[in-house]
Every structure is written in C-alpha cells, then in structure tokens.
Image: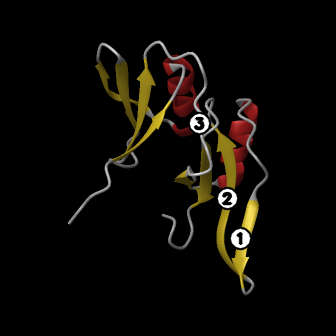
Amino acid sequence: MAKAIHSMIRVLDEARSVSFYERAFGLRIADRLDFPTFTLIYLRNGEADFEVELTVNKGRTEPYALGDGYGHIAFCVDDLDAERARFEGLGLSPRPIVDFKSDGELLARFFFVEDPDGYKIEVLQKHGRYR
C-alpha cells in the first residue's frame, strides 16, 4: 500500500517561508539538505508524518509563476474560528470562513490563506471526512 509522505513547493526565500509555515501551522524543520544549486527543507509537526518540502533554488531572484495548475494544500484544525483569529493576529491575511453545504448539510467549514510565494492553503475545521 502506498503512503503519501510529502508535497513539494518551490519558494524564493527560505527564512520567510519557514517562518510562515511555523507561525501558521506549527511546522518545524525536520530535515534540511543543502546542495550546490538548491536546498531542500522538510517541514512537519507532531500531528502527522506528512511533510511539506520547500525547495529553494539558489541564485533565483524572480518569483515563481504558479500558473493555473496548482490547487492547494490543506490542513485541518480543531477550532477554525480561533485559528482564523490567530492568523489575523499574526498578520497572515486569511480569507473569510466559508460554510460549504450540499442539500443543506454542512460538508466543510474552511478559509484560505496564501503563503509568501502565493501558494493557496486551505484550513478546514475537523469535521466529517476532514479529521
């Protein structure tokens, strides 16, 4: 059986990105591999083994074009309202909370935030299939 282990994104500024993911989601550096032309930084927290892999290509000065193919990565939390307020307090500019329903039944509550490179991140209330 296959196991999902990480999602990789390219970032421009290592310190700025590591700070964002630590402040927003409590992710800390689990490993850092430095190579002559790039650096890989693996981030995780105690909630899961799944990691976010940041790739920093050395010498790059232009922001990455995200194109129209990237969707988002998602995190679930116990108290969505408190997390959104915390994000606001950190100056992370979360979008409004959305109650996503089908036939009057709540499927999910969530908000989106963008990291320093413009990657969209969905923050979901633990509920239903999102645990």
In the image, what residue type sits under mark 2? Phe
Residue underneath mark 3:
24
Q: CA distance from mark 2 to mark 3?
A: 15 Å
Residue drawn 76% across the image and 47% down it: 95
Labels in figure, total: 3
Is the Cβ of the residue at disc 2 closer than 8 Å to that at disc 1? yes
User: Against 110, is 22 above or below?
Assistant: above
> Crowding near pointer 2: few (<14 within 10 Å), some, many (20+)?
many
x and y percentages locating residue 98 in the rendered image: 75, 62
Q: Is residue 14 left or right of residue 86?
A: left
Query: Which one is nearer the viewer's eye here, 41 or 38?
Result: 38
Residue underneath mark 1:
100
Residue drawn 51% across the image and 28% down it: 11
In the image, what residue type sits under mark 1? Phe
Q: CA distance from mark 2 to mark 1?
A: 8 Å
Image quadrant containing the N terminus: bottom left
Secondary structure under the numbered disc 1 in the rendered image: strand
Query: Which one is nearer the viewer's eye here, 128 or 119?
Result: 119
x and y percentages locating residue 9 in the rendered image: 47, 37
Q: Is residue 41 left or right of residue 83?
A: left
User: Against 62, is 122 above or below?
Assistant: below
